[in-house]
């Protein structure tokens, strides 16, 4: 069976190493592509129909409002099926202690029974937060593996960290 690397990432203005920086590629996308090189898994980007603003402060206000109202933003597309995958690597930035709400939308769309979910997140100091517990709650039939938190400012050099994480499986 194949592996799927499903991830949410955001380029544009981001908080990195204590400063607002403009990123051409979001940190989680960098990690997802490194993971693809290591696993050969297929890749799928979780993208809401209405993306967050390019401006960092506006983006965080929008994302926090989504979280407060427990929104499930519609996604631009979905995989046809997850039947051909037994392993799902799920990537996302930590937004206020959990995943962006678009990732909740993705997880609630499919039945993950019998699948292994490997969560990985990028962050600037908050680690995985409660995201692993949220994934377990949303995907009760899945085997949720120990997640990996990658400091966003160091994601480009995270290959050895990802290799070690994969060896745990």
Image (spheres, grey):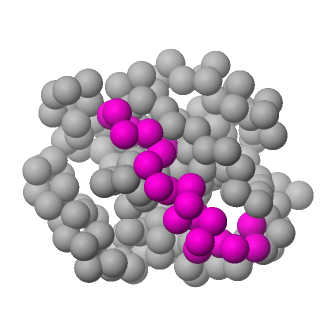
Q: Is residue 134 magenta?
A: yes
Q: Residue at x 22, y 64 (%)?
A: 64
Going by the picture, which residue comes out furthest to the right?
1
Would you say residue 8 is visible in this rendering? no
Image x and y of residue 92, in percent: 46, 51
Exactly how many numbered labels are in the figure?
A: 0
- Residue 153 versus residue 139: which sits nearer the camera? 139
Is 92 placed above or below 154 here?
A: below
Query: Residue at the spot x=63%, y=65% of the render?
Result: 136
Quarter of the picture containing the C terminus is top right
Taking the spot 15% from the left edge, 33% from the top edge, the residue there is 20
Seen from the viewer's position, the closer of residues 123 and 75 is: 123
Quadrant where the N terminus sits is bottom right
Which image quadrant for residue 8? bottom left
> Left or right of 35: which side holds 167?
right
Q: Which residues are magenta?
A: 121-142
Relative to 113, does residue 24 appear above or below in the rendering? above
x%, y% of residue 115? 79, 64
Q: Does 6 appear in magenta?
A: no
Q: Position of residue 109 (x, y in %)?
A: 58, 81
Residue 120 seen in render: yes
Q: Identify whether 159 is placed above or below 107.
A: above
């Amino acid at each position: 069976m194949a592996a799927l690397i499903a991830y949410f990432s955001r380029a544009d203005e981001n908080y990195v190493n204590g400063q607002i920086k403009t990123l051409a590629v979001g940190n989680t996308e960098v990690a997802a592509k490194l993971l693809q090189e290591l696993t050969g898994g297929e890749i799928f980007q979780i993208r809401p129909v209405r993306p967050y603003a390019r401006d960092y402060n506006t983006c965080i206000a929008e994302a926090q409002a989504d979280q407060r109202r427990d929104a499930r933003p519609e996604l631009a597309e979905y995989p046809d099926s997850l039947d051909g995958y037994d392993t799902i690597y799920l990537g996302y930035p930590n937004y206020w202690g959990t995943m962006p709400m678009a990732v909740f939308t993705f997880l609630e769309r499919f039945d993950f029974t019998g699948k292994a979910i490997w969560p990985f997140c990028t962050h600037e100091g908050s680690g995985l937060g409660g995201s692993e517990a949220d994934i377990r709650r949303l995907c009760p039939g899945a085997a949720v593996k120990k997640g990996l938190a990658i400091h966003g400012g160091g994601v480009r050099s995270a290959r050895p960290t990802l290799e070690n994480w994969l060896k745990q499986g």
